[in-house]
Image: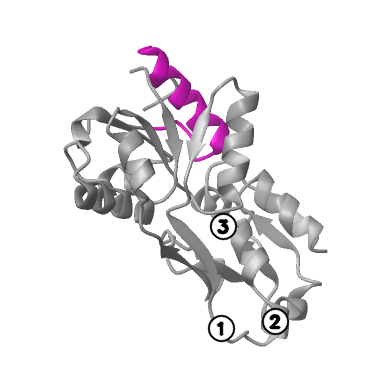
């Protein structure tokens, strides 16, 4: 599958994806089809929390002044970029995951720990180990934006679209349908099987990366564009 590559994630993640793609020798066209906005939330009593569980840098960016109550709590971050944003905001990072929040929880030792999970309205459900308690607060939400006529015209020529969330998969399908874009000319590269399932059917191809991180996703995109069958996809 050769052709143009598109990313539709919200900023500032969109800019990061385009920059990482450029370093990997890929040209990615971007249009944010979501805008991240803060959500009103009530912080729990800080004394009842041992650590923060952060699955997205957006939780730090949009958590607001209430985050200051937890400045002394160690952060368990889903990945390197989230950990870097947490550190830049003054938090100490205790653990950095590589395979999603569930893997991060599964790799904890047996000590009891009380987490405050700061998340978005669209989030992955977690299986909580017996020795772990999780208090959850929604601190941001992704508001869908209309696809521009320009992007619809570009998509009419086909290509590969990167999808970073199930919400993005559903919204992209709806917007392509609204604009009359031929789904059969578009291939989807997603971060995981749950996202692929949310994209529904009608596409030329749907494949998900071997790991839920940007490096694996870009490797998959590169292989899809080159038409290779020996990619890291599963």
Identify the residue at image location x=19%, y=44%.
180
Note whether 74 is above or below 175 in the view shown.
below
Rate crowding at label 1 as few (under 14), some (14 to 19) or many (20 or more) other CA atoms within 10 Å: some
Contact between marks 1 and 2 (CB within 8 A): the answer is yes
Label 2 vs label 3, nearer the camera:
2
- First in sequence: mark 1 vs mark 3: 1
Q: Is residue 79 magenta?
A: no
Q: Which region shows up in magenta?
A: 208-229
For the residues carrying marks 1 and 3, which lies nearer the camera in this image? 1
Label 2 or label 3, whichever comes before in sequence order: 3
State the image coordinates of residue 107 (x, y, percent, origin top left): 59, 48
Q: Are marks 1 and 3 in contact (CB under 8 Å)?
A: no
What distance separates the C-alpha of mark 1 from that of mark 3?
17 Å
Question: Label 1: which residue?
Answer: 41
Q: CA distance from mark 1 to mark 2?
A: 9 Å
Q: Which residue is mark 3?
A: 55
Q: Position of residue 51 (x, y in %)?
A: 69, 68
Which numbered dot is residue 66?
A: 2
The front one of 200 and 103 is 200
């Amino acid at each position: 599958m050769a052709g143009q590559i598109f990313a539709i994630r919200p900023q500032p993640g969109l800019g990061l994806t385009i920059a990482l793609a450029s370093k990997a020798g890929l040209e990615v066209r971007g249009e944010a089809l979501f805008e991240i906005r803060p959500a009103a939330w009530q912080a729990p009593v800080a004394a009842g929390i041992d650590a923060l569980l952060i699955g997205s840098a957006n939780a730090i960016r949009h958590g607001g002044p209430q985050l200051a109550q937890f400045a002394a709590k160690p952060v368990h971050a889903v990945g390197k970029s989230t950990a870097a944003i947490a550190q830049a905001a003054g938090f100490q990072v205790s653990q950095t995951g590589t395979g999603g929040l569930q893997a991060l929880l599964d790799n904890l030792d047996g000590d009891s720990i009380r987490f405050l999970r700061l998340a978005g309205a669209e989030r992955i459900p977690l299986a909580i180990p017996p020795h772990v308690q999780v208090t959850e607060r929604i601190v941001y939400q992704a508001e869908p934006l209309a696809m521009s006529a320009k992007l619809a015209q570009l998509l009419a020529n086909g290509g590969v679209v990167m999808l970073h969330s199930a919400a993005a998969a559903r919204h992209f399908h709806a917007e392509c349908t609204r604009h009359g874009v031929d789904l059969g000319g578009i291939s989807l590269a997603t971060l995981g099987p749950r996202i692929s399932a949310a994209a529904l059917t009608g596409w030329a191809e749907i494949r998900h990366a071997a790991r839920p991180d940007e490096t694996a996703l870009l490797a998959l995109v590169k292989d899809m564009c080159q038409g290779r069958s020996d990619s890291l996809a599963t």
